[in-house]
Amino acid sequence: MRIPKAIQNLIESFERLPGIGQKTAQRLTFYLLHVPQGELDKFAKSVQNLKKETILCSICFTIGERNPCDICQDPRRDSSTICVVEQPLDVLALEKNGKYNGIYHVLHGKIDPLNNIGPDEIYIRQFLDRVKNSSNGMLIKEIILATNPTMEGEATAMYLSKNIKYQISNIKNIKITRIGRGLPTGADLEYADELTLQRAMEGRSAY
C-alpha cells in the first residue's frame, strides 16, 4: 500500500521530534486524521505562532512574551540570587514548585564535548558577563548552579564555578551553591516532582 504523500510528510515531521519513533509518529498522524478540521487549523496556527509570538529574554535568556521577561521585571523577586539552569523547561519546573523567589539564567544546553557543544555554544559567556557587571548596581549574594545531575551537567557546573571564582576577581563574597539533595544522579529537573525539587533547593551546598 502506498501511503499518501501528505501523511508520509507529517510522519517524517513527527519523527524529527525528540523521543518520537516511527510507530509513535504514525499513531499521532493517523489520530490527527480523525480530528475535526477546525481543531487541526488551531493546532497548525499554534505551531506557526510558536516563534512569532515568543521572545528570548535579553537578561536571563528564558522564553517569554516580552523582553525583559516577567520574572526579570518583577520587583518582588530577589535579584541577589541567580539560579542557573540548562533549559527554559527547568524554569517552569522550579516556578511550579513556588518555593524559589530569585531570578534565573538559562544556558540553553550544557557542555557536551561528545556532541561538540562547548562553552561558546551556550549562554555561559553572557552569564559570566552578567556576574562581572553586577558590581554596577545589582548585588549578587548567591549563585545556585542547578544544572542537571548528569555527567555533562556536573561538568558545566564545575566550569561555571571555576570561572566565577578565578576569572571574575573583582566580585567578592558571592556564595556559589550546587542543587543536590533529593535529585538522583542522571535525572533531569523537568521530570522531578515538586517535593523533590523543593528538597533539592533546600539542600543545596557550597560548590
Image (tube, helix red, strand yellow):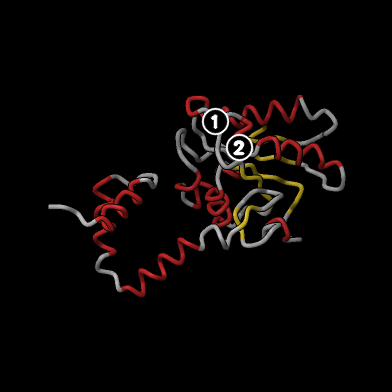
Identify the disc placed on residue 117.
1
Residue 92 rendering spot, x and y as whole percentages: 55, 54
Which residue shows up at 56% across the image and 49% down it? 88
Residue 38 occupies which quadrant of the picture? bottom left
Q: Is residue 2 left or right of residue 163?
A: left
Tag 1: amino acid? Ile
Residue 50 rendering spot, x and y as whole percentages: 51, 60
User: In which quadrant will I find the C terminus?
Assistant: top right
Q: In the image shown, does 207 or 22 lie closer to the viewer?
A: 22
Tag 2: amino acid? Ile
Q: Is residue 43 left or right of residue 160?
A: left
Q: Secondary structure at mark 2?
A: loop
Label 2 and label 1: CA atoms lie apart by 8 Å
Tag 2–tag 1 contact (CB < 8 Å): yes
Identify the disc placed on residue 122.
2
**Residue extending furthest toward the right:** 136
Which residue shows up at 61% across the image and 54% down it? 99
Q: In the image shown, does 26 or 173 lie closer to the viewer?
A: 26
Tally of marks: 2
Residue 10 occupies which quadrant of the picture? bottom left
Q: In the image shown, does 196 or 105 lie closer to the viewer?
A: 105
**Residue extending furthest toward the left:** 1
Q: Secondary structure at mark 1?
A: loop
Which residue shows up at 45% across the image and 38% down it? 187
Identify the disc placed on residue 206.
none
Q: Is residue 167 above or below residue 66?
A: above
Q: Label 1: few (<14), some or many (≥20) within 10 Å?
A: few
Residue 13 rendering spot, x and y as whole percentages: 35, 51
Q: Label 2: few (<14), some or many (≥20) within 10 Å?
A: some
